[in-house]
Image (cartoon, helix red, strand yellow):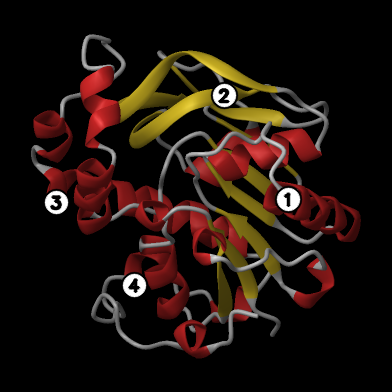
Amino acid sequence: MKPIAICRHDLSQGPAYLETFLAQHDIPYRLFTIDAGDAPPTRASEFSGIVLLGSNASANDGYSWIRREDRLLQDALQKNCPILGHCFGGHMLARALGANVRRNSVPHIGWGKVWVTTFSEAKYWMGSKRELDLFHWHFETFAIPRGAKRVLFGRHCMNKGFALGPHLALQSHLEVTADSIRAWCASDHAQIEQHQHLASVQSEARILQHLDEKVAALHQIANHTYQQWLRPIAPARLIPVQHIYEHQRPHGGACWGHMMPTR
């Protein structure tokens, strides 16, 4: 099968658990490290799916790599190539579908409850639970594109996720691990301190409290969502959710994706 393209825009916002999940299912991918100088691809036909990760940039910025990623998404939408956007990636998908991206009323950093809408698409993507505890780190928000369905909403940000056909945008981070959250807090500690007075921003101590348990629960949600996104891409390779941990490889082990060229 063709690899999945993953675009990373910031070292602290890498694929993390998504990378592990793809390795568990022997699904190839190519990681484009935009923050390290890689140019994003522009031809969706070379890939089975497109994943855009988070970024400290705004989707409204005019950087050349953002314009390239926009061309990639437009091509993917025309070819019905599944797109998965995490935070900034969700903003990019919203813009590609004609919706606005703007500053959120407050920054949202830390763990927080979101609610699953009653649309059938929401249950398909997020599972049967109506309330989820997700990890958030964002300053902007997207509008829901015409024809898409809101699948998640929250207290500090109304639009926490939308779906349209095989495409999913999340205003949260299912891909984080305990290690990546610790690294993120260390690299962007100033953001936490600057907005600590807001109820929507947790302290670093609170973010890291019971971290392993929170991340384990988050990954159960991620297992379902990633399975659903991959279903039209590689149905024969998907391990049933209940067996994933039985087949889990040591974190960081070699897989096809690590060995594929990035250009």
Residue receiving disc 2: 141
| Residue 111 in view in this figure | no
- Secondary structure at badge 3 equals helix
Residue type at mark 4: give it: His
Q: In which quarter of the image is the C terminus?
A: bottom right
Residue type at mark 3: give it: Asp
Task: Find the distance from the CA under tag 3 to the CA under tag 1.
Answer: 38 Å
Q: How many labels does the image show?
A: 4
Q: Position of residue 219 (x, y in %)?
A: 32, 54
- N-terminal label among 1 and 4: 1
Query: Which of these two is toward me, 186 or 181?
Result: 186
Badge 4 density bin: few <14, some 14–19, many ≥20, Cα 10 Å: few
| Residue 168 in view in this figure | yes
Task: Find the distance from the CA under tag 3 to the CA under tag 2.
Answer: 28 Å
Q: Do the residues labelled 1 and 4 touch (CB within 8 Å)?
A: no
Residue type at mark 1: give it: Ser
**Residue 259 in the image: above or below residue 124:** below
- Secondary structure at badge 4 equals helix
Residue receiving disc 3: 212
Between tags 3 and 2, which lies in front? 2
Residue receiving disc 4: 243
- Secondary structure at badge 1 equals helix
Q: Position of residue 45 (x, y in %)?
A: 83, 72
- The residue under the point 44% across, 30% down is 138
Badge 3 density bin: few <14, some 14–19, many ≥20, Cα 10 Å: few
Between tags 4 and 2, which lies in front? 2
Q: Do the residues labelled 3 and 2 touch (CB within 8 Å)?
A: no
- 23 relative position to 120: left or right: left
- N-terminal label among 4 and 2: 2
Residue receiving disc 1: 64
